[in-house]
Image (cartoon, rainbow, N blue to C red):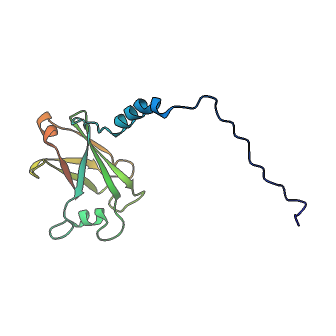
Amino acid sequence: MQSPAAVPIVPAMVTLSPRPIRLAALAPLLAAALVSCSRETAADPNSRKIEWTYGPTSGTATPEHVAGTGTKGGAAIAKGWTCRLVDGKRLTVSPYQLSSSHPLFGKVALSIGLFDKDSKDIGTVRSGTLTATNASFSFDLADDLAKRLFDVVIWYQAI
């Protein structure tokens, strides 16, 4: 016995188009879309991401560096860094998830070692004082240095 509140479900009427779409006619369009979506574009050597890592956090590492990375004594100043070469001459360094407060704010700067593909040290830049409101930095590099730049190593240094 059915409940009086039950409403029977009736399938909707489906009408098909009088002109079926021919998949063969769409094949060239689908193939072109697939090729264009799967094609890798060449990276722009003048504007690219630069890989980074922290300097060693043991051995001769300074107390500021160990504390800044969060290896010892609490949270890190930032969860990470975003480093980019912009316009083939400017290195930008910005924090990823910067701490809202840290005991080292106002007491440290970033020392950034620049390295080529062969891990050869090709230079160093130093930021201004690192604070909760001043943690993104930009450095103009010589053309030959910028072309060779492959990755960076970051250290927290006392000021």
Q: Is residue 57 above or below residue 22?
A: below
Q: Residue at x 35, y 69 (%)?
A: 74
Q: Quadrant of the N terminus?
A: bottom right
Residue 153 sits in which quadrant?
bottom left
Compared across the picture, whether 31 is left or right of 3 comes to: left
Q: Nearer the viewer, residue 101 or 17?
A: 17
Compared across the picture, whether 76 is left or right of 143 comes to: right
Q: Is residue 156 above or below residue 61?
A: above
Q: Quadrant of the C terminus?
A: bottom left
Q: Residue furthest right?
A: 4
Can residue 159 be seen? Answer: no
Q: Nearer the viewer, residue 142 or 105?
A: 142
Q: Residue at x 74, y 48 (%)?
A: 11
* Image spot of residue 23 (x, y percent): 48, 34
Q: Nearer the viewer, residue 17 or 112?
A: 17
* Image spot of residue 146 (x, y percent): 16, 38
Compared across the picture, whether 4 is left or right of 137 comes to: right
Can residue 93 be seen? Answer: yes
* Image spot of residue 59 (x, y percent): 15, 70
Q: Is residue 123 above or below residue 62?
A: above
Q: Nearer the viewer, residue 75 or 122?
A: 122
